[in-house]
Amino acid sequence: MLCLTGFPLGGGSAGCNALYQLSKRGVKAVLLERSKLTAGTTWHTAGLIWRLRPNDVEIQLLRSTRDLLTKLESETGLDPGWINNGGLYLANNKERLNEYSRLATVGHSFGIDSTIVSPEEAKKLFPLLDENVIHGGLYCPGDGVVDPAMLCTALTRSASKSGGQVIENCPVQNILTGKNGFGSKKVTGVTTSYGVIKTNCVANCSGSGKGKADFPSDFADKSPNEAAGYSTIAEHILKFEEIKSLPRGVKIRRLDEEMD
């Protein structure tokens, strides 16, 4: 039986980041993954890093993520797959462009460099654009992309050096609970195929698609994600052949079509 104070469940980018942050702060933590690291949604995610969001909390979290990506290689000796190629938000109408102006103002207050660009300037950034069908855009040069698998490798390597532990092929069978001093339910441990691990803190990083058959819990009849208000979503993966003529530069986001 192990006794721990921090416990991420799920070996994707969320779980690996949680293990990294806990270990860096001196927390005795272990990550459990039922299969292999990045075996879930993480392995096929695009890894897009867009730093501008409508609220300040998300902006600060994304800024912190980007700062970590820029220093992780020097810290671990492993390339996290970070590419700083910039991001271009396209506006199909005047209302969207006005929204981007407000977004840029919020970003500047947090030190996020961004610029409103004309249709012609947007075309210079991404030559395949038709400048006649857009009203302009918001260019954020500090945005980029990251390879999720390479990132998770770097995060867990650093966490291991700080005392963190990763256990693969170890599905969680149950979350054990007890009562606190107020009579409310609290976590006391988790049951795995290898035995019981005592902990007072569990972080569910298993992804929105995990139902109670994947992750049973004593907390409720619902799965942890269902209890938290999340719903399972369908994922669609499109695979394309390489388009050699496609310019390798800034990435595009077009919110009016809700498609990256």
Image: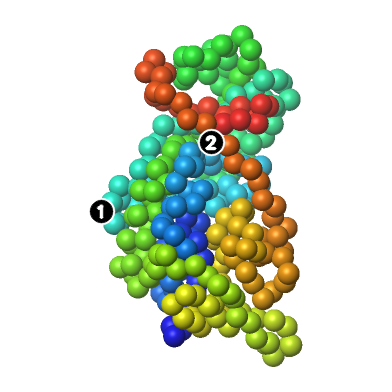
Which numbered disc, 1 or 2, marks the residue that appears first in the sequence? 1
Establish if 216 lies above or below 101.
below
Among all residues in the image, which is located at the extreme left?
A: 77
Q: Which residue is mark 1?
A: 77
- Residue that lies at the very extreme toward the top in this rendered image: 132
Measure the alpha-carbon separation of dots 1 and 2: 32 Å
Does the rendering let one see residue 134? yes
At mark 1, the secondary structure is: loop
Task: Please tell me how crowded label 1 is: few (under 14), some (14-19), or many (20+) other residues with Cα within 10 Å.
Answer: few
Percent of width and height locating residue 62:
52, 48
Question: Residue 21, can we see it?
Answer: no
Question: x, y (%) of residue 32?
Answer: 46, 67
The amino acid on which the numbered mark 2 sits, given as a three-letter code, is Ile
Q: Give the number of callouts.
A: 2
Of residues 120 and 147, the one drawn nearer to the viewer in this rendering:
147
Q: Residue at x 41, y 42 (%)?
A: 146
